[in-house]
Image (cartoon, rainbow, N blue to C red):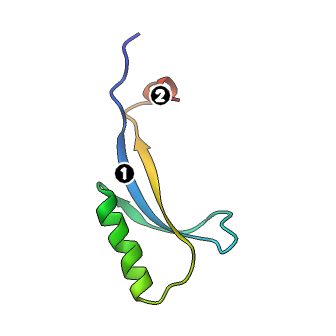
Amino acid sequence: MSVPDPPEILYEAVLMRNDQDGIVYQAGAFTTEVEAQKVLDIWRAEGRTEPMAINLVPVYRSAEDWDADR
């Protein structure tokens, strides 16, 4: 069995619930962490106070690649 290429990583800016038990809003996914961070910075500048995070989302070509990577 061949080793799959590592997955591409996307960076997703999200607003979290105040109890941090889930995501309330996903702003979108970006190809760099720097761009996702800009979204968090914009939200803060707009006065948002909810917990925020950047999720790292691996992008696989197939379920088999995902299975081999887990």
Residue type indicated by callout 2: Asp
User: Quadrant location of residue 2?
Assistant: top left
User: Quadrant where the N terminus lies?
Assistant: top left
Q: Residue at x 37, y 18 (%)?
A: 3
Q: Which residue is mark 2?
A: 69
Residue type indicated by callout 1: Leu
Q: Residue 62 in the image: x percent, y percent?
A: 41, 30
Furthest residue in direction top, as rendered: 1
**Spatial CA span between label 1 and label 2:** 16 Å
Q: Residue 22 in the image: x percent, y percent?
A: 64, 63
Q: Are marks 1 and 2 in contact (CB under 8 Å)?
A: no
- Left or right: where 42 falls relative to 53: left
From this view, report whether residue 5 is shown above or below residue 8: above
Mark drawn on residue 60: none
Q: Which residue is mark 1?
A: 10
From this view, report whether residue 68 is shown above or below residue 55: above
Q: Secondary structure at mark 1?
A: strand
